[in-house]
Amino acid sequence: MKITKIPFDDILFDSKTAADIIANVCKRSKLHVSGLCELSESVAIIFSDGMEKTKNFTFAKFAEENDEGKIAEIHDRYRGGFDLIGTFFIDDQLWGLFKKKE
């Protein structure tokens, strides 16, 4: 198991580069993303043993504020080929980490 912390400021500044950190860990090791945990100033990405098939991850803000809208966004991304790994808040904004289905 490995845990990598990604600061919220890095996600806000350049979410693509922040997501590339996750892909790089998967490329360099025989690990896959098994979850995440919101911390006070960062999100902890949890990696477990086993090869990750995807190398495409993305952080995305949820545009909708109500529960039905958030669920609809998850469904839309799923239909677009992305699975939700987990969610976390930066300030009052809900974010998700998604991975491209292979």
Image (spheres, rainbow, N blue to C red):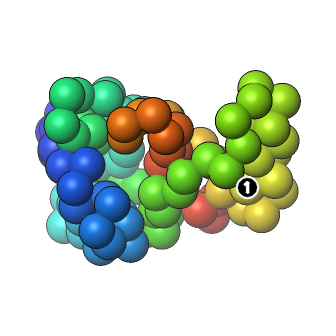
- Viewer can see residue 23: no
- Where's residue 80, x and y in %? 77, 63
- Where's residue 95, x and y in %? 49, 44
Foreground pick, 16 / 21 = 16
- Where's residue 84, x and y in %? 59, 43
Foreground pick, 82 / 18 = 18
Q: Quadrant of the N terminus?
A: top left
Q: Secondary structure at mark 1?
A: helix
Q: Quadrant of the C terminus?
A: bottom right
Q: Which residue is mark 1?
A: 77
Looking at numbered disc 1 in the image, what kind of residue is underneath it?
A: Arg
- Viewer can see residue 36: yes
- Which residue is painted at 22% across and 61% down in the image? 10
- Where's residue 59, x and y in %? 46, 57
Please state if 40 lies on the left or on the right of 14 as rendered: left
Please state if 53 lies on the left or on the right of 81 as rendered: left
Q: Residues within 10 Å of mark 1 (few under 14, many from 20)?
A: some
- Which residue is painted at 62% across and 47% down in the image? 62
- Which residue is painted at 80% across and 38% down in the image? 69
Relative to 68, residue 55 above or below: below
